[in-house]
Image (cartoon, rainbow, N blue to C red):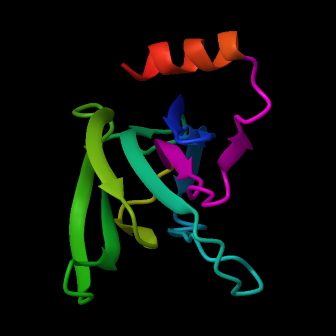
Amino acid sequence: HLATTHRKGKTCNNIMAEQAREYVWACELSKEKPTFVFSFKEEDEDEDYLIHTLFLKNAVLGASAVESERNLIQMETKDSNRKDLKAPIVSLTLGKKDMCALDLSFGEEVTFRLVEGSGPVFLSAQELVEYPEDGNLSQEEDTEDYTETEEDELKGTEE
């Protein structure tokens, strides 16, 4: 969005476009690799001020899952008081419930852990990365060089 405001002798353009990108995300949990950590931290611990949100969409058993075996997935993250939070989020059993839709979002680092069963269980999600607003996106121009016609047009848009 581009908003234009006119002040005495100045035209100010403010770019208010929110910049965000969406990515497909997935992980596999199995007996061999029962844990996956989704972390937003940069490797060099440099704060990039990006806002990351993971929207967990579904869980599905893989082709090599064991018949009638229960697969239980637990998430581990921080609550709003910054205390550890652990809770089961998915229970799948081949032949009874092979997949389920999820509607969970995480704005903090989260660990997914296969706490029961041998998997494989695939989690899929959408990752939203929002970029911070740039405070320097405001541009000012002098209107002193405008012709009378251009100034009249500017005055007409102010009303």
Q: Tell whether position 124 is magenta.
A: yes
- Taking depth in this image into account, of 84 and 148 the one nearest to the observer is 148
Q: Quadrant of the C terminus?
A: top left
Residue 22 falls left or right of residue 72: right
Q: Residue at x 23, y 90 (%)?
A: 83
Q: Bounds of the magenta span?
A: 121-147
Q: Position of residue 54 (x, y in %)?
A: 44, 52
Displayed quadrant of residue 12: top right
Residue 28 falls left or right of residue 99: right
Residue 110 falls left or right of residue 84: right
Q: Residue at x 53, y 42 (%)?
A: 8
Q: Tell whether position 134 is magenta.
A: yes
> Given the current orientation, which residue lies at the most extreme front position?
148
Q: Is residue 69 visible?
A: no
Q: Position of residue 121 (x, y in %)?
A: 46, 48
Number of marks: 0
Q: Position of residue 113 (x, y in %)?
A: 41, 69
Q: Is residue 129 above or below residue 113?
A: above
Q: Is residue 69 above or below residue 142?
A: below
Residue 115 falls left or right of residue 156: left
Q: Position of residue 103 (x, y in %)?
A: 26, 42
